Amino acid sequence: MGQIELKGIRKSFGGIDVIKGIDLQIDEGELVIFVGPSGCGKSTLLRLISGLVEASDGQILIDGDDVTGKPPAERELSMVFQSYALYPHKSVRENMGFALTVAGMPKAEITQKVDEAAATLKLEDYLDRKPKALSGGQRQRVAIGRAIVREPRAFLFDEPLSNLDAALRVEMRLEIARLHQKLGATMVYVTHDQVEAMTLADKIVVLQAGQIEQIGTPLDLYRHPGNLFVAQFIGSPK
Ligand code: ADP
Ligand code: MG
């Protein structure tokens, strides 16, 4: 579960090519990070995978199913954004269970799934609170919890930590690493932060101007950057 394949993916907005032909395979259970400078197309690529943006050309396969052109709901992926987009008037429990409620899941089952996710994320004591009574880190946990209860084929994160202060960012980074280990789930994670990429990723995809510059493990990229752009971006001594 959670294998993602991109074949010749292109996207243009108003005649401007933003994603210029991406071929990529993400294996089941991998934590893959898209990294690159602002405007290089990281978020667009993630939205193409989620279905929030439709490709101009190419194919997207999830677990071998061609999902090209299918709406987000049919892709069974969960997206976590940097702005948490929580419902302010709903409790943490209601926020986390909302998608399941809408899907018509029996209440007892929702309660069980929310309790389980809350335990994983250390949110047990906050389930009755409203988002405004939570810290930034706790809100981000709720947003992740909302993704977990849906049991997606893969998690998509778009700069989930960029609204947090430095100390909290480190804490949440460890949290995400722990979560990845525990769930064994495929995670595709966008960041412009090299340190985040180097410490979290199984595999890093370095993007520049809508194209892949290099793919490799953090160590590969550090030791053998393919060009000066990658070397400078990763911070390796080339
Ligand atoms: P990143 O996440 O790497 O910062 P984005 O994927 O957000 O980059 O954007 C890549 C480029 O595509 C930018 O030049 C951006 O202005 C453009 N872009 C993204 N979304 C749209 C859109 N909906 N309409 C027009 N241009 C867009
Ligand atoms: Mg972005």
Image (cartoon, rainbow, N blue to C red):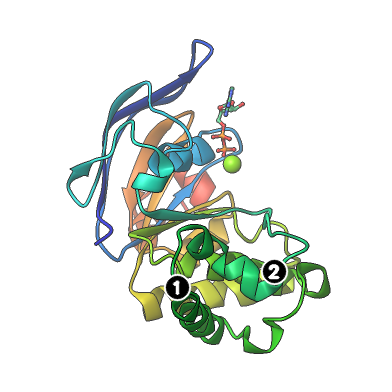
Residue nearer the viewer, 156 or 125: 125
Q: Which residue is mark 1?
A: 106
Find residue 118 and report its horizontal and vertical position in percent.
56, 82
Residue at (62, 88) in percent of width and height: 124
Residue nearer the viewer, 83 or 7: 83
In the image, taking residue 142 as reference, residue 91 lies left or right, namely: right
Find residue 224 and report its horizontal and vertical position in percent.
34, 52
Q: Is residue 159 above or below residue 202?
A: above
Neighbours of disc 1 within 10 Å: few (<14), some (14-19), many (20+): few
Q: Is residue 112 above or below residue 163?
A: below
Residue 68, numbered circle: none
Q: Which residue is mark 2?
A: 139
Give the residue at the far right of this rendering.
Answer: 133
Q: Is residue 167 above or below residue 46?
A: below
Residue at (66, 69) in percent of width and height: 169
C-alpha span from label 2 to label 1:
25 Å
Q: Quadrant of ligand 1?
A: top right
In the image, taking residue 25 as reference, residue 155 lies left or right, namely: right
Sequence-earlier tag: 2 or 1: 1
Query: Residue 168's image quarter?
Result: bottom right
| Front of the two marks 2 and 1 | 1
Give the residue at the far left of this rendering.
Answer: 64
**Amino acid type, label 2:** Arg
Query: Under tag 1, what secondary structure?
Result: loop
Give the residue at the far top of this rendering.
Answer: 15
Residue at (25, 55) in percent of width and height: 3
